[in-house]
Image: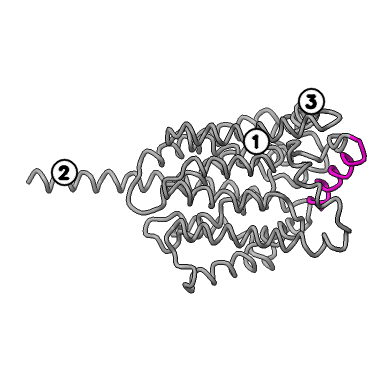
């Protein structure tokens, strides 16, 4: 369904109309050009090819996450982890079924972090920039480049989608449609259909009777705390490869807490990244809170009153908030452990 929205926008553009006539088209103009080849294919071919491409993106993201953590691709964990994601994590199946372009971010983020871990920061910025040009989901990664003081990588991340979108916008009948139509729609978040499936606290809390301004304040405060914890995690390098994925996951979770909309399949951007670190000592995935957060996403488990599809947003909101709490709590506990170890090392050295 979600890929069909982008393809329909491309067909509208090819017919001379504005893709932003559809309020559910929430992408930059460059995505219209990227979807144009699909608009030329018959629907029967798309029904076969698109889910395969989405699955390939998710598998590719898992491979990059494993390499980032130094896990051999032929290990049992590599195979079992992928099977667990595909079979035991409901958003995986949802994303393949919907064929949302979130799959591009699920591949681009671990690939960019893998490049950054090898010192290729500018290439990482280009990868993130290309993903943003397709769907602006990875925009929070600008903060990671800012934390790392990688100015050329940050410039690449900004310039790539800016140039591609500007060039594509000149080909549109409504060149600034994203800013005049889509951006206000995202800021208002007043679509009654979309709101039923949003997982951010700003959308879920009002359904429980919380006033909208209070819900937005809670979501913004929580996101600010997670961003602060992401910065503190970056400032505490520590041994092993966990610094990059944990900082990136925290930044993405902070955005999902306030973004409108925010869906369950957005979790595919961070969960494989964190799960791939399970074999590494001190990883977030070794916390029991991590598995508690994922419990509502296990297919086949019945949750009273939440099985209606319009209510699953409550389960998704729990997972989102619990994951954000887990990352924050893990960062604080690891920080205390690091300070204790530093104090011990200093005491032994002085003795």
Q: Earlier in the sequence, mark 1 or mark 3?
A: 1
- Looking at the image, is mark 1 or mark 3 nearer the viewer? 1
- Looking at the image, is mark 3 or mark 2 nearer the viewer? 3
Q: Position of residue 47 (x, y in %)?
A: 82, 62
Q: Which residues are magenta?
A: 1-17
Kindly state the secondary structure of the residue where label 3 is placed. Answer: helix
Q: How is the image coloured?
A: one colour
Q: Residue furthest right?
A: 15
Which residue corresponds to mark 1?
161
Within 10 Å of disc 3 (Cα), the crowding (few <14, some 14-19, many 20+) is few
Q: Is residue 12 magenta?
A: yes
Marks 3 and 2 sit apart, C-alpha to C-alpha, by 58 Å
Marks 1 and 3 sit apart, C-alpha to C-alpha, by 18 Å
Indicate the quadrant where residue 94 lies: bottom right
Q: Residue furthest left?
A: 351
Which residue corresponds to mark 2?
346
Residue pictured at 18% horizontal, 48% vertical? 344
Kindly state the secondary structure of the residue where label 1 is placed. Answer: helix
Q: Position of residue 55 (x, y in %)?
A: 68, 62
Q: Is residue 252 magenta?
A: no
Kindly state the secondary structure of the residue where label 2 is placed. Answer: helix
- Mark linked to residue 217: none
Left or right: where does residue 187 sit relative to residue 225?
right
Please report contact status of discs 3 and 2: CB closer than 8 Å, yes or no: no
Task: Using the image, determine if residue 60 lies above or below residue 116.
Answer: below
Marks 2 and 1 sit apart, C-alpha to C-alpha, by 48 Å
Indicate the quadrant where residue 254 lies: top right
Q: Position of residue 283 (x, y in %)?
A: 42, 55
Q: Earlier in the sequence, mark 3 or mark 2?
A: 3
Which residue corresponds to mark 3?
180
Using the image as rendered, state which of residue 214 and residue 8 is in the foreground. Answer: 8
């Amino acid at each position: 369904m979600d890929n069909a929205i982008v393809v329909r926008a491309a067909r509208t553009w090819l017919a001379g109309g504005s893709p932003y006539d559809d309020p559910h088209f929430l992408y930059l103009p460059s995505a219209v050009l990227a979807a144009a080849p699909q608009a030329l294919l018959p629907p029967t071919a798309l029904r076969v090819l698109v889910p395969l491409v989405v699955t390939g993106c998710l598998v590719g993201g898992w491979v990059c996450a494993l390499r980032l953590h130094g896990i051999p691709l032929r290990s049992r964990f590599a195979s079992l982890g992928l099977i667990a994601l595909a079979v035991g994590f409901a958003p995986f199946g949802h994303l393949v079924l919907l064929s949302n372009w979130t799959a591009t971010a699920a591949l681009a983020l671990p690939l960019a972090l893998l490049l950054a871990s090898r010192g290729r920061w500018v290439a990482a910025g280009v990868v993130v920039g290309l993903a943003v040009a397709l769907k602006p989901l990875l925009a929070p990664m600008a903060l990671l480049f800012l934390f790392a003081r990688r100015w050329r990588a940050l410039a690449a991340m900004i310039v790539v989608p800016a140039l591609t979108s500007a060039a594509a916008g000149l080909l549109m009948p409504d060149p600034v449609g994203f800013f005049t139509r889509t951006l206000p729609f995202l800021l208002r978040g007043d679509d009654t259909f979309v709101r039923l499936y949003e997982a951010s606290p700003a959308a879920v809390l009002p359904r429980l009777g919380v006033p909208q301004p209070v819900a937005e304040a809670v979501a913004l405060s929580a996101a600010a705390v997670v961003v602060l914890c992401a910065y503190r995690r970056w400032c505490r390098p520590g041994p092993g490869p966990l610094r990059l994925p944990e900082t990136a996951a925290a930044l993405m979770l902070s955005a999902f807490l306030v973004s409108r909309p925010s869906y369950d399949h957005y979790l595919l951007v961070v969960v494989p990244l964190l799960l791939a670190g399970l074999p590494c000592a001190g990883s977030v995935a070794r916390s029991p809170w991590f598995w508690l957060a994922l419990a509502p996403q296990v297919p086949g488990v019945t949750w009273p009153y939440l099985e209606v599809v319009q209510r699953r947003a409550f389960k998704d909101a729990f997972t989102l908030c619990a994951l954000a709490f887990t990352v924050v709590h893990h960062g604080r506990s690891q920080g205390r452990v690091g300070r204790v170890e530093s104090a011990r090392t200093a005491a032994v050295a002085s003795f």
